[in-house]
Image (cartoon, grey):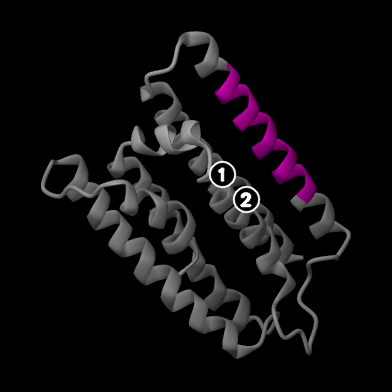
């Protein structure tokens, strides 16, 4: 039950933070008010449906860890949006939104990875095997670096172009 609560919390918090970051890009993009509203509504609807779907399959036990799983099923809710995001890079409008996302906000989104430290608790309680603790180290390192990066970016001490935005959302987000 604890694993479901922790997973459910992450399944709401991280999409909400990512939604906030992408909406910043939409708001800053050189689109008219009508197009911005359309993109915000679509984004909010898709994220909301994704969160509801993830909660549903989680509560039904479809993505629960099972001994012998080669690839943990609980990673599916992370990889599907990543693959969709990579596909969306073909869209000029999506690339425009990425180009207008403040990098400090995008880096700050990854600070939520500090919550990956909960893997230590889950392993300690014997809910998941010890191998999962390794993911906790990676999450804590990513979250800590993201915190420092977002502060440096917000203070104008560091700049990075579109490649950083793409890695921040899709590649580095699940390091």
Q: Which mark is residue 88?
A: 1
Q: Residue 5: horizontal and vertical position, in percent? A: 70, 58
Q: Residue 152: horizontal and vertical position, in percent? A: 17, 49
Under circle 2, the secondary element is helix
Under circle 1, the secondary element is helix
Please name whichever residue, 155 or 27, is drawn nearer the observer in this view of the structure: 27
Q: Residue lying at the far left in this picture: please name it.
A: 157
Which quadrant holds residue 128? bottom right
Please name whichever residue, 87 or 64, is drawn nearer the observer in this view of the structure: 87
The Cα atoms of the two marked residues, 1 and 2, are separated by 6 Å
Number of dots carrying numbers: 2
**Tag 1–tag 2 contact (CB < 8 Å):** yes
> What's the magenta region?
38-53
Examine the residues drawn in magenta and state their main secondary structure: helix
Q: Is residue 132 above or below residue 38?
A: below
Residue at point 45%, 11% (across, down): 32
**Residue 114 shows in this picture:** no
Left or right, residue 56 beside residue 80 = right
Which quadrant holds residue 21? top left
Instruction: Classify mark 1: residues with Cα within 10 Å, few (<14), some (14-19) or many (20+).
Output: few
Residue at point 26%, 47% (across, down): 161
Left or right, residue 41 beside residue 73 = left
Q: Quadrant of the N terminus?
A: bottom right
Q: Residue 8: horizontal and vertical position, in percent? A: 68, 54
Q: Is residue 101 above or below residue 55?
A: above
Residue at point 56%, 44% (across, down): 88
Q: Is residue 39 shown in magenta?
A: yes
Instruction: Classify mark 2: residues with Cα within 10 Å, few (<14), some (14-19) or many (20+).
Output: few
Q: Quadrant of the C terminus?
A: bottom left
Q: Is residue 125 shown in magenta?
A: no
**Residue 159 shows in this picture:** yes
Q: Which mark is residue 84?
A: 2
């Amino acid at each position: 039950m604890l694993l479901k609560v922790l997973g459910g919390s992450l399944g709401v918090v991280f999409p909400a933070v990512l939604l906030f970051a992408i909406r910043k890009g939409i708001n800053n993009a050189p689109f008219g008010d009508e197009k911005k509203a359309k993109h915000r509504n679509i984004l909010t609807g898709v994220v909301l449906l994704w969160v509801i779907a993830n909660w549903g399959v989680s509560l039904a036990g479809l993505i629960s860890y099972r001994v012998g799983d080669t690839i943990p099923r609980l990673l599916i809710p992370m990889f599907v949006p990543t693959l969709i995001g990579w596909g969306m890079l073909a869209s000029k409008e999506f690339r425009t939104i990425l180009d207008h996302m403040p990098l400090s906000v995008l880096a700050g989104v990854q600070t939520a990875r500090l919550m990956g430290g909960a893997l230590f608790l889950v392993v300690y309680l014997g809910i998941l095997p010890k191998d999962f603790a390794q993911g906790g180290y990676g999450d804590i390192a990513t979250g800590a670096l993201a915190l420092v990066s977002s502060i440096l970016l917000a203070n104008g001490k560091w700049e990075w172009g579109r490649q950083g935005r793409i890695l921040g959302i899709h590649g580095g987000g699940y390091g």
